[in-house]
Image (cartoon, rainbow, N blue to C red):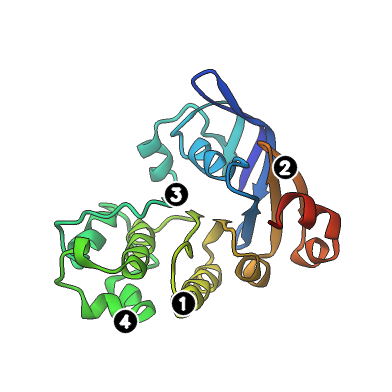
Amino acid sequence: MLRVTNLQAFYGKSHVLHGVDLDVKEGEIVALLGRNGSGRSTTAKAIMGLVDCQGSIVWKGQESLGHKTFEIAHLGLGYVPENRDIFPKLTVHQNLLLGQKRGKRNPRWSFEDMYRLFPRLQEREHTEAGVLSGGEQQMLTLCRTLMGDPDLIIIDEPTEGLAPKIVELVAEYLQELRKRGVSVLLIEQKLTIAMRISDRCFVMGHGSIVFEGTPEQLRSNTDIRKEWLEV
């Protein structure tokens, strides 16, 4: 579904990604793990056309590298950045409305779905998004992206700073996506969540992929975990 090959990315003269190879198949959750500064967020931004990069990014058989971000989104990729981009002066409902793609026939997701997954959003439906808690804003960002009905969603640190109860809600949400046929590229530091719900894991270090395998294989590989994941 998504195949990234020999991806090189740059911030000005800084060479950040060094030949990243990864793939996400239809209907699977893939975790992209690593310490801060390892290149995980840059990989997500490169896939979405937000940084200068070279290599190949093939989405559903079509080369998407070089496309503008809005064009990539219209191809069916959704992106939830780590900074929880919401429109603070718009209500929860208005934020969700902005996520919809016009002219999309028979979308998989509705407002009712969003409010069923996160009842707290329904309670705050007419509240300005800027006064929501951090957890509520994260829920809103996730749901707004989903309202665009992507086939693959890239989610950067969705559980950062959230209470344990909300973290569990996010995990359930991601599993619900998989049930509905949406693929997920999950960028996460909390290994317990990522290892529990993902089908495969990639580990990044210094802008390169240093491990690829199942959660079980990563659990048994103490060398990789010590060198690239554990503090």
Kind of residue indicated by mark 4: Pro
State the residue position of label 3.
76
Residue 156 in the image, given as x and y percentages of width and height: 49, 53
- Residue at 44% from the left image edge and 44% from the top image edge: 75
- Residue at 68% from the left image edge and 67% from the top image edge: 195
Residue 59 in the image, given as x and y percentages of width and height: 56, 42
Between the residue at mark 2 and the residue at mark 1, the CA separation in whole angstroms equals 29 Å
Q: Is residue 194 left or right of residue 210?
A: left
Q: Nearer the viewer, residue 178 or 94?
A: 94
Quadrant position of residue 17: top right
- In the picture, the quarter occupied by the C terminus is bottom right
Between the residue at mark 4 and the residue at mark 2, the CA separation in whole angstroms equals 38 Å
Label 3 Cα crowd, 10 Å radius (few <14 / some 14-19 / many 20+)? some
What mark, if any, has residue 169 been given in the picture? 1
- Secondary element at image label 3: loop
Q: Nearer the viewer, residue 53 or 192?
A: 192
What mark, if any, has residue 119 been given in the picture? 4
What mark, if any, has residue 209 been given in the picture? 2
- Earlier residue among tags 1 and 3: 3
- Earlier residue among tags 2 and 1: 1
The reply to whether callout 2 and callout 1 are in contact (CB within 8 Å) is: no
Residue 218 in the image, given as x and y percentages of width and height: 79, 61
- Earlier residue among tags 4 and 1: 4
- Secondary element at image label 2: strand
Kind of residue indicated by mark 3: Gly
